Amino acid sequence: MSNIQTTRQRLSSWMAGLVRIDKFDADPPAELYSTASTTEALYPANTVIEYPVKDLFFERSEITGITGSGSFSYSIVYRYPGDLTLNELPLLKLEGLVQYLQAQALLSLSGCGGIRRAVPGTSNEFPVQIERDGTDQGDWLVYANLVFNVEFVLTEFGLDPAFGPTPELPPDLNELTIGVYRAKTDFDVGEPNDSTLDATLTVDLST
């Protein structure tokens, strides 16, 4: 576990507590409608794409030891039917969604779950982006892009063993020597004189 991972988990939980998220996935939603849909209301399916942290930086601090900072980027991707016109897509509402989450970050993220400070960042020129999914039905995929510039205190210094140095291997053994001792049943292992070496056996390990 790292503070980067802890920060990401905190951001994901915070976001899921504010807006409906069908699942976190690296791909756009495959289905048209959310599983949260009811007979009264059909909701567009969505997924949240979590991007690798950008602009990661660490510095020494006399008060907190080591402080880290980075930009954590997300896209909430919604799928809409391809037969909708561009004007029928709820683009203004999705811009409002981005505004809502960025404003809530200023109000409620700082000081929570190991996050010292969190402010909205700039993702790109467009907070909401549109594209076709490239299939025969030509569904719309609309991306609501979010960036949070986060400062956190570094407290977790563990390293996954998969990335650690190669462990030292024991030296090759060509032979093994075994001593055969004779002693009384109640002999003291801490007293060498209580046992007698009867024989020495050498086992060849090279074959």
Image (cartoon, grey):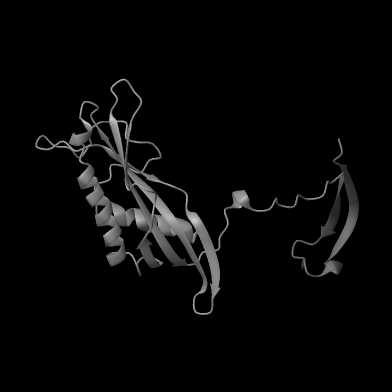
Relative image position of residue 12 (x, y in whole percent): 35, 53
Relative image position of residue 60 (x, y in whole percent): 56, 73
Above or below for 43 versus 100: above
Drawn side of residue 176 relative to residue 155, left or right: right
Spot the residue most to the bottom. Answer: 62
Q: Is residue 165 visible?
A: yes
Taking depth in this image into account, of 165 and 68 the one nearest to the observer is 68
Drawn side of residue 162 relative to residue 194, left or right: left
Write down the quadrant of residue 111 in the picture: bottom left
Taking depth in this image into account, of 199 and 145 the one nearest to the observer is 145
Total count of labels? 0
Write down the quadrant of residue 151 in the picture: bottom left
Drawn side of residue 48 relative to residue 63, left or right: left
Q: Residue at x 32, y 64 (%)?
A: 109
Q: Residue at x 84, y 56 (%)?
A: 181
Above or below for 143 versus 98: above
Relative image position of residue 28 (x, y in whole percent): 35, 36
Write down the quadrant of residue 183 in the picture: bottom right
Taking depth in this image into account, of 89 and 29 the one nearest to the observer is 89
Drawn side of residue 12 relative to residue 183, left or right: left
Above or below for 112 versus 38: below
Spot the residue most to the top. Answer: 136
Taking depth in this image into account, of 91 and 164 the one nearest to the observer is 91
Above or below for 134 versus 92: above
Q: Is residue 17 visible?
A: no
Relative image position of residue 34 (x, y in whole percent): 23, 37
Where the C terminus falls, by quadrant?
A: top right
Q: Residue at x 36, y 26 (%)?
A: 134
Q: Residue at x 21, y 25 (%)?
A: 83
